[in-house]
Amino acid sequence: MWKDVLRDFAFSTILTLGLMLRLVYTPYTAGSDIAQFASFSDTFLRHGFSFYEYADGKYYVEEGWPYNWPYVYGPQLILILAPLRAFFNQHVTAYWSNGNYYVYVPVEWVVACKALFISFDVVVGVLIYTILSRSGGGWLGMLGFALYYLNPAVIYNSSIYGMFDQIPLAVLLASIHLIKSGRSLLGVSLAGFAASFKPNIAPASLGVLASSMFEGKGLKRRLLELALFLTGLLSPFIPFEASYPGTIPRFIKILLSMAPGYTYPVVYSFNGFSSLATYMHEHSGGDYQWVISYWWVSLIVLVAVVSAGVLVFKKRDGVTLSFLLYLAFTASYWRVNYQYLTPAVGLASLQLAEGRRRLPVILVFSAYVALWFFLFPVSWWAHVHIETPNQGLWRVMDMFSLMVFDEGVYVLYSLILTMLSVIVLLLVALS
């Protein structure tokens, strides 16, 4: 009995501590995407289901967007953010002055977005705890919960910069939980829904689908699961496609328009080869774009390794397969942002379900992902988009930062991260 009380106390302590750490930053920091989310939402509120006609950023000036970045996500995000924006519709300030471009986000919108993101951080943490507790007991679940929920990279993503990767991650983990609970039909449908939420989640979602279909089932059952996965994938687009035929091809065109290129700024690039090619181009003037354009070669090789793990070592569990395919993606894709590593940390935490001998590998990987948080002067987000910065918080954030400004350090960091991802993939797939 006392063990249960102690476990509940530890769970409450981790939950409270993680929430407090997030709330400290919530109103006083903001990343550039939060400003852009406001503009995306304004466009949807103006144009409704014809939104994807404007999503490529071609009309960003007419639409009043601060940046020309396209909307490269499924409809789920805009359907969630637009109602928030209808209530918190304060104007985003953007202007040029003395050759500098300034973008300031209203605090009300910052808090509204981050409240959503932080809520799903909690959901992800609880799902990790639940999944691990089923397989290895409450204390294993507690460890996985802490590895995700208290990771500085995860806290940065939801409450300092403000990005939404934890939302599709929560949907993906819910699908894994449902499949493990014997409700595979609903589970694979949710996996498809997660895949179209944000494209970088698609590899992990395919891992969940493949895992479910590997089980001893008849052809009809497998085809049904595939159909349900595709239904979950496409269902968010139905009202858009029904109102404006051609929305799905338009979305695909926007995704394909993201052609491989040099990854600026290097400090925010997390594919080692892309970072190195960009850095060498900047400092030598040479053409190293070919290194980036062949990113798909490494993806094919790593997927082949994962396939070998499936065939030879029977790595067919959804927890493992989703993690391996996601690692294959982040270790290969030419443009990896820091927020892409939030799902990597969450899926890595679930690896504890496959045996405690994986704990050292998962600890090293998770700690290395968190290291960037202490290298980069994250206080940048405490003033660049906040019109009236909190000077005290700004100084405190700088106290915990190594304040590294040398781009070469970040190139080295991303190279090691890519190599570490490959090593972890090999160890998990072929052990």
Image (tube, rainbow, N blue to C red):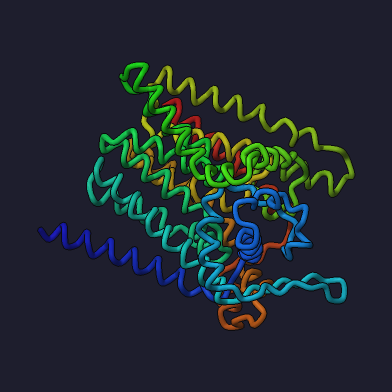
Q: How many marks do you count on the picture? A: 0
In the image, taking residue 48 as reference, residue 253 lies left or right, namely right
Q: What residue do we see at 64% from left, 51% from top? A: 50
In the image, taking residue 352 as reference, residue 363 lies left or right, namely right
Query: Which quadrant of the view contains residue 353?
Result: top left
> From what the image shows, is residue 356 above or below residue 70?
above
Q: Nearer the viewer, residue 147 or 115?
A: 115
* Residue sitting at the far front: 243
Please state the horizontal and vertical placement of residue 25, each as a whole percent of the image.
52, 72
Please state the horizontal and vertical placement of residue 2, each as a whole percent of the image.
12, 61
Q: What residue do we see at 42% from left, 47% from top? A: 171
The reply to whether residue 353 is visible in this rendering is: yes
Q: What residue do we see at 51% from left, 70% from top? A: 112
Q: Nearer the viewer, residue 409 or 349?
A: 349
Q: Quadrant of the N terminus?
A: bottom left
Q: Quadrant of the C terminus?
A: top left
Q: Nearer the viewer, residue 411 or 48?
A: 48
* Residue sitting at the far left: 1
The reply to whether residue 33 is visible in this rendering is: no
> From what the image shows, is residue 147 above or below residue 83?
above
Query: Which quadrant of the view contains residue 354?
Result: top left
In the image, taking residue 317 as reference, residue 324 lies left or right, namely right
> From what the image shows, is residue 197 above or below residue 207?
below
Please state the horizontal and vertical placement of residue 315, each as a whole percent of the image.
39, 26
Q: What residue do we see at 38% from left, 22% from top? A: 222
In the image, taking residue 245 as reference, residue 367 lies left or right, namely left
Please state the horizontal and vertical placement of residue 348, each as a whole percent of the image.
43, 43
